[in-house]
Amino acid sequence: MKRLHFGADYYPEHWERGRWEVDARLMQQMGIQMVRMAEFSWHKLQPQEDVFDFQWLDEAIALLADYGIYTILGTPTAAPPAWLIQKHPEILPIDREGRVRGFGGRHHDCQSNPIYREAIRRLVTEMAKHYGENPWVIGWQPDNELGNSHQELCTCDSCRQHFQKWLEKKYQSTEALNAAWGTAFWSQEYNDFAQVPAPRITVTGENPSAMLDWKRFCSDLIVDFTREQTEIIRRYAKNQFITHNYMGFANKVDYYKLGELLDIVSHDQYPGGFYLSQTPHEYNHVLAATLDIVRSYKNQPFWIMEQQSGITGWEIMGRAPAPGQLSAWALQGIAHGADAIVFFRWRTCTMGTEQYWHGILPHSGNPGRRYQELKELIGTMEPLMGRLQGSMPKPQVGIVFDFEQEYAFQIQPHHQDLNYTGQLLKYYQAFYKQNISVDFVPQQGDFNQYQLLAAPLQYLMSPELEDKYFNYVRQGGHLILTMRTGVKDLHNLCMADRELPGKLSELAGVEVLDYDCLRETHVEVLFEGQKLQANIWSDLMRLRPETKILASYASEFYAGEPCITEHSFGSGNCYYVGTEPGEELMEALISQICRKAGVEPICVPVPEVECMTRENDKTRFLFVINHSSEAKSYTVPQGYHLLWGEQAGKLGAYEVQILEIEK
Ligand code: GAL
Ligand code: ZN
């Protein structure tokens, strides 16, 4: 595979032909080595059912090649053209209210529709045949941000029938389905799979077991939709890679499973998205976590396929990135394991929904501040990228992240402010603030490579997963379990054979006999002699005699009872957290547990300064990122020397330094 590191998302079809060469020259001068193109240009490639026109794209690829620039091709299946919709309106998706969603945006498609699938097979086959051996095409991106815009879609007849088949394969008989879904409740028994609906809004309430299977089905449908394309591409394009642009923690499709179809995971990173809170220090840890989850999906270096390159905006806009900030965000991606950064987009578009989603070039097309800044970044970083390539962060801490747990909490959040990913991020934040780097780990993953494993909200539980936790701790691991663990089986039915957290109570040394959902209030907790705050939930527990109490409740009718505990088991320790610790309590708790587990920070924490390492067999690289507009100092850890930057230990606004140490 070609080792390319910097690129731009390019839409030549939005501009006059005469401009293309100017773009190519400006890109070359800036150090851009690749572009992604065509992921929304179905109509341009197939203007009518029986007319394919690849000439414009051939010309664009060839012209860019003259300037040494390679191409990644998107398949344009996120934007089915009007002629196709007119002829087959049943391709349009139907939402949970039963409304047909119309043409005029994107992703106006039903991914199970056989006619749509046939049209896609035809187009993708033509494209793969045509470009599969073009040496200037290095890779493919099927569709665009799969799962985006499809959150509640689609409930059409085709999707209903596919869901029924999926259920039939899984359960074989309606008796098994009825048992798994607990349909005895409210007379929901099915006599025939053909009676099962795709879940439209109901008069009242939903069956949580049916909803969990529906979400699993929707995820599998996207994987299947993608597989159809990757199979075609692989048939004709033997030396080109396949990637897809993920969206961090987006949860419609199980990204671990999708990743099995791909050579590389990519991601779209918009730290200044207009839809985010505009006070960056509140979400620096979220940006970091987003990059860590993306690396974790395939546990290998990833690419950024869309990296913010200016003000974001659709109807409203985000703030202008300050000088240096675009570079700092791009380098943050590299620090967390990105091997390549593709900036979105080359030039700000004059038409359509994204007129205010600013690119490297402004509307006028004249290079300005952003072009100069990113040119300088590429010019100085490119010589280093080869050395960084393939190196990985090697965290001592893992946080377990699983899509089915996420789905189960979407269905029943318990508390208006509880959500699965948000809860994981609260744990993540405490590690982040202490400069302790983290991997996310799938439940099927290898736990043993981590000294400390945090597994919040392990709500759906299987005997296999229980065994993994027992083994992990038995062999010396430090495990954090929390409230709402072991509550349900994999059908989303409550388990009733013993007290919570079920069999894991032997590992945690606690049994939860009762609990309190902290509506519109919080609880006080006594920890290391201090009264601190906790939220959302209180587990009320009976302990085994050997279980140690780390914190107790200090308010409510259960004041004085245990809240956070520690239990030795085998050669390791299991901590049980019966609440959601507030920020201060979380930090104090995590630092105590890290001490006990022998987990060390990368360097001494400084507020708003992020530290991250990547390493290979020989070298460890340390990235230090100043996320603030103020100068900052940090203590250079012993033995490291400066590889990139001005003066080690002194950071200007948004400055990043890279240091290295031989191992
Ligand atoms: C991404 C998407 C791009 C573009 C960009 C700006 O989510 O993949 O196609 O829409 O956001 O809105
Ligand atoms: Zn459908």
Image (tube, rainbow, N blue to C red):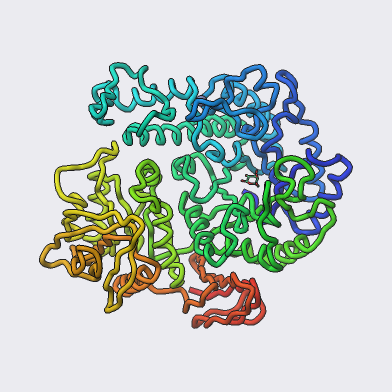
Please tell me in which quadrant of the rendered image residue 563 appears.
bottom left
- Vertical comparison of 181 with 347: above or below: above
* Residue lying at 23% horizontally and 50% vertically, measured from the top left: 467
Q: Position of residue 329 (x, y in %)?
A: 62, 62
Q: Position of residue 478 (x, y in %)?
A: 28, 64
* Residue lying at 63% horizontally and 42% vertically, measured from the top left: 139
Front in this rendered view, residue 3 or 182: 182
Residue placed farthest to the left in the image? 545
Q: Is residue 270 left or right of residue 564?
A: right
* Residue lying at 43% horizontally and 30% vertically, measured from the top left: 201
- Vertical comparison of 401 with 143: above or below: below
- Vertical comparison of 113 with 215: above or below: above
Q: Position of residue 195 (x, y in %)?
A: 35, 18
Asked whether residue 573 appears in the rendered view, the answer is no
* Residue lying at 41% horizontally and 36% vertically, measured from the top left: 215
- Vertical comparison of 498 with 309: above or below: above
Q: Is residue 321 left or right of residue 337?
A: right
Front in this rendered view, residue 624 or 73: 624
Front in this rendered view, residue 304 or 418: 418
Please tell me in which quadrant of the rendered image residue 509 appears.
bottom left
Q: Position of residue 144 (x, y in %)?
A: 60, 40
Residue placed farthest to the right in the image? 18
Asked whether residue 139 appears in the rendered view, the answer is yes
Instruction: Please count the marks in the image.
Output: 0
